[in-house]
Amino acid sequence: QVQLVESGGGLVQAGGSLRLSCAASGSIFSINTMGWFRQAPGKQRELVAVIISSDSTNYRDSVKGRFTISRDNAKNTVYVQMNSLKPEDTAVYYCYVVADGRVYWGKGTLVTVSS
């Protein structure tokens, strides 16, 4: 079993920055993909950014140039640096990890961007 622990959410003013972290622990042989989704109130969960084992990254268009995803394979941790935050970035951010052929989700961390 794999556990994901997220941290770094909070309240920030528009234009500010936050860095989210997600550490995976447990019985892990190999992690392929790590990434972040988010879900705003009344909306569907959407992909924010993903990084695969080759360090290839992909972002949703609305965060390109503002968010940067990275990973530390030695620590089984994925990060997302979020700059120039906008009120529309307000959501619960969920970490997800594909490890040993299975998908795992974090419990989510709330990011609130005030205008």
Image (spheres, grey):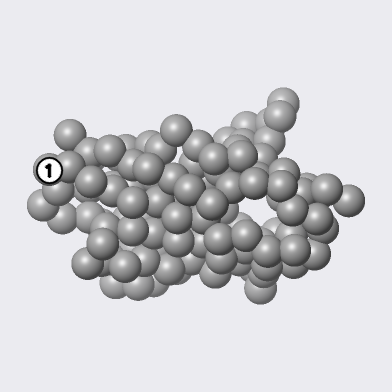
Q: Position of residue 109 (x, y in %)?
A: 54, 40
Is residue 50 among the parts visible in the rendering? no
Q: Position of residue 18 (x, y in %)?
A: 62, 60
**Residue found 43% across the figure and 68% down from its top:** 70
Is residue 8 among the parts visible in the rendering? yes
Seen as rendered, the residue at the extreme right is 115
Residue nearest the viewer, comparing 71 with 16: 16
**Residue found 28% across the figure and 48% down from its top:** 24
Residue type, numbered disc 1: Ser
Which quadrant of the view contains residue 110?
A: top right
Query: Mark 1, residues whose alpha carbon is within 10 Å: few (<14), some, or many (≥20)?
Result: few
Mark 1, residue position:
27
Q: Position of residue 21 (x, y in %)?
A: 45, 55
**Residue found 44% across the figure and 45% down from its top:** 6
- Element type at marker 1? loop
Which quadrant of the view contains residue 65?
A: bottom right
Q: Position of residue 54 (x, y in %)?
A: 29, 72
Is 46 displayed left or right of 24 in the figure? right
Q: Relative to 113, is 64 above or below?
A: below
Is 57 displayed left or right of 62 in the figure? left
Residue nearest the viewer, comparing 59 with 87: 87
